[in-house]
Amino acid sequence: MTKHDAALVWLRRDLRCEDHAALHHALRSARRVHCAFVFDTEILDALADRCDRRVEFIRESLVELDQRLDALSRASGGEGSGVLVRHGRARDIIPALALELGVDAVHCNRDYEPDATRRDAEVADRLRTAGIALFDHKDQVIFDKGEILTRTGQPYGVFTPYRRNWEARLDALQMQAHPVACHAAALAPRPGSASMPSLTELGFEPTDLARLPLPTGMSGGETLLTDFLGRIDRYHEARDYPGVKGVSYLSTHLRFGTVSIRRLVREAVAAGGEGARTWLSELIWREFYQQLLWHHPHVVDRSYKPEFDAVVWADDEAGFAAWCEGRTGYPIVDAAMRQLNTTGYMHNRLRMVAASFLTKDIGVDWRRGEHYFARKLNDYDLAANNGGWQWAASTGCDAQPWFRIFNPVTQSKRFDADGRFILRYVPELARVPPRHLHAPWEMDDATQAAARCRIGSDYPRPVVDHGEARARTLARFEAIRTAP
C-alpha cells in the first residue's frame, strides 16, 4: 500500500477512537494522522437556545476523546496526540486546516443529511483544487445508500421486507470492527499549543447535563451499554413502559458516535433471544429511516407521500402552545412533554403518543412538532425524527394508517397503568384516585376537592375532546382521499 505522508481525520458524529472507520483507514494509509473537530457555526448559529445540552455533550465527549488519543499515541511510543478543535464554518476551516497541516488526504465518515452532503461536496471540491483527496467511509450504519434495495433495484418503502433483506445480508464482514489502537503509532503530535474552547467561548451557557443520567463520551456509552446488556433479555417486554427501566438509553451516544453501531449489532447478535432480536429490529428501523432520507431528501420539509402535502392542518396556536408546555389536560401527553422539556429525553412509546396527539387530536401540522422535538431532544437525529413524525402523522413511509388514531387515555392505561410515570412529571395529580388518573376531568366536584385538584385551575381541562377530534381528523384525511 502506497502511504500518504500525512492525513487529516475530520470528526463529526463519530466522537470515539475505537472501531472508527475513517480513523482506521487514515492510520493505515498515512505516516502521520491529525484529528480535527469543528464546532460548525452554520449548525450552532441555527440553534434556538444558547443553553443546549447537545453542545455540552459534544464538548465533554471531545475532552475524553482528546485524552484517549493522547494515551493511544504514548502507548505506541509516540509523543502524544489529540483533537484539533476549531470554531467556525467547517466548509472553510477543513480545507484551510488541511493546507496548514500539509496533508495529502482528508478522511471522514459519511453523513446522509442533505445539508451535510452538500457541505461535504463543497469541501471535496475545494480540497481537490488544492490537490488534496477527500475519502469518505461508511461508519454510522451497517448498510448505506443503495446497499439494501428491492429486487427491482428500488429503495424500500416498507420496513418489514427491508428488515428481512437487511438481516439476510448481515454477515461477519459487515459487523467487523475497524481497529485503531494497533495503528496508533501514526497519530501525529498536536502542532503548537491547543486548548478545548469553553462553552462560553462557543457562545453557549453551561447546562444541567451533569445532573442527568446521561454520561458523556466513550466511557459514558460503555457504561450505558454494559447496564443494558444485563437487561436485554427483557427488552421486548419492558420497552413500551416509560415508568420502568426497559430501553437502552443509548440514542444520544448513537447520534454522536460515542458508540459504534457495529459493536451494538455484534452485541445483539451474540445475545440472541427475543429481547435482543427486538432491539436489533429497532437498530434496523434507524437505518431504514437513514436510507429513506438518502433516497428521498424531500422528506425534510415535505410529506413522503406527496398527496398528503394537501392536508389542511388546523391553525391552533393555543393548542400547540399547550402541547409544547405539557398542559393539554391529558396526563400521559403532559408527562411526556414535561419529560422532554425537563431532561431532553422522551421515551419512544411516548414520542408516538405525543406526535399522534398533536397531529390527530389538536390537528397541527407534523412539521411544527418535528421542529419542536429537533429543538429539545438530546438525541435529535433528522432521519429518525422526521421518519417518526411522518409515521405518526400518516404522511410518511410505512406509516400508521390515517384512520388509526391513538386514544391517549387508552395508551395511558395500557402503558402506564399505575401512573408511575405520570406522577413523576405531573405531581399535581398526586392525590387523584387511581381510577381517575388517566382522565382526571371525569372526577366530580367532591372528588376534585378531596384530591386538591380542581380541573381548570390546579390542572388544565382537556384542550380537545378526543372523540370530536378523531372525527375532524378522519374528515381531514378523507378529503384528501376523495379529492380529484
Image (spheres, rainbow, N blue to C red):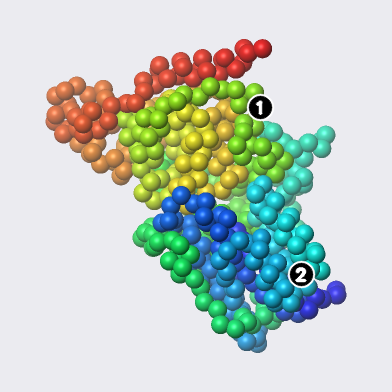
Residue 28 position (above or below residue 312)? below
Quarter residue 16 falls in: bottom right
Q: Is residue 149 left or right of residue 180?
A: right
Q: Position of residue 297 (x, y in %)?
A: 68, 40
* Residue closest to the far right: 2
Q: Residue at x 22, y 24 (%)?
A: 443
- Report the Cα–Cα distance between label 1 and label 2: 41 Å
Q: Position of residue 265 (x, y in %)?
A: 63, 54
Q: Mark 1 belongs to which amino acid?
A: Pro
Q: Residue at x 66, y 60 (%)?
A: 91
Mark 1 or mark 2, earlier in chain: 2
Quarter residue 337 falls in: top left
Q: Which residue is mark 2?
A: 105
Residue 388 position (above or below residue 360)? below
Q: Residue at x 76, y 79 (%)?
A: 31
Q: Secondary structure at mark 1?
A: helix
Q: Which residue is mark 1?
A: 306
Q: Mark 2 belongs to which amino acid?
A: Ala
For this rendering, which residue is in front, 81 or 168?
Answer: 81
Q: Secondary structure at mark 2?
A: strand
